[in-house]
Amino acid sequence: MLKCHGVSHADTVRDIELMVQEGLVTRRAFKGVISYRNVSGKGVSHVPGRSSRVARWIHEALKELDSGQGVCMVNIEKWVMTSHPYYHHNLKGKIKGALKEDLELGKIWQVTEGKYRLLEAAE
């Protein structure tokens, strides 16, 4: 582990050990916990459904492309690939997974088969 944003190795390990004892994370989640702590420089958040990079891009695409009828997945994929051309590894699979997770969490809703809208846009 690297020291990043003033977070020392000992602090990170101690925080993770406390979270394991409290049952917030499992030992298998250590690597992800450490990288998230080091990237953010803040306290570790373990909220279920934490937004991934692709999920944030999907929300940006829906905000920009939605004209009231919903946005199809093909248009979301095109927008993400155009906006972030350097990030293309398994992008279609990640978009499908993020859409499915956001539907389950209630962040977006499905207007018709294959068309999505943000929940805020519906209200």
Image: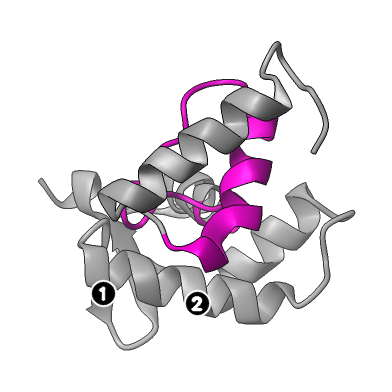
Q: Is residue 15 above or below residue 69?
A: above
How many labels were placed on the picture?
Answer: 2
Identity of the residue drawn at 50% across and 56% down: 55
Query: Type of residue at label 1?
Result: Gln
Expressed as whole percent of the image width and height from the top left, the position of residue 60 reads 51, 44
* Residue situated in front as seen by the camera: 94 or 6: 6
Per the rendered image, the range of residues in magenta is: 26-55
Q: Earlier in the sequence, mark 1 or mark 2?
A: 2
* Residue situated in front as seen by the camera: 10 or 45: 10
Identity of the residue drawn at 31% across and 88% down: 113
- Please name the residue that numbered disc 2 is placed on: 97
- The residue furthest right is 86
Is 24 left, or right, of 32 in this rendering? left
Measure how far apart labels 1 and 2 are at the Cα level: 14 Å
Identity of the residue drawn at 47% across and 43% down: 17
Q: Name the quadrant of the N terminus.
A: top right
Expressed as whole percent of the image width and height from the top left, the position of residue 24 reads 32, 52
Which quadrant holds residue 4?
top right
Q: Is residue 72 visible in the rendered structure shown here?
A: no
- Please name the residue that numbered disc 1 is placed on: 110
Mark 2 is surrounded, within 10 Å at the Cα level, by few (under 14), some (14 to 19) or many (20 or more) other residues, namely some
Query: Type of residue at label 2?
Result: Gly
Expressed as whole percent of the image width and height from the top left, the position of residue 48 reads 31, 56
Q: Name the quadrant of the C terminus.
A: top left
Which quadrant holds residue 49?
bottom left
Identity of the residue drawn at 34% across and 64% down: 102
Is 64 left, or right, of 90 in this rendering? left
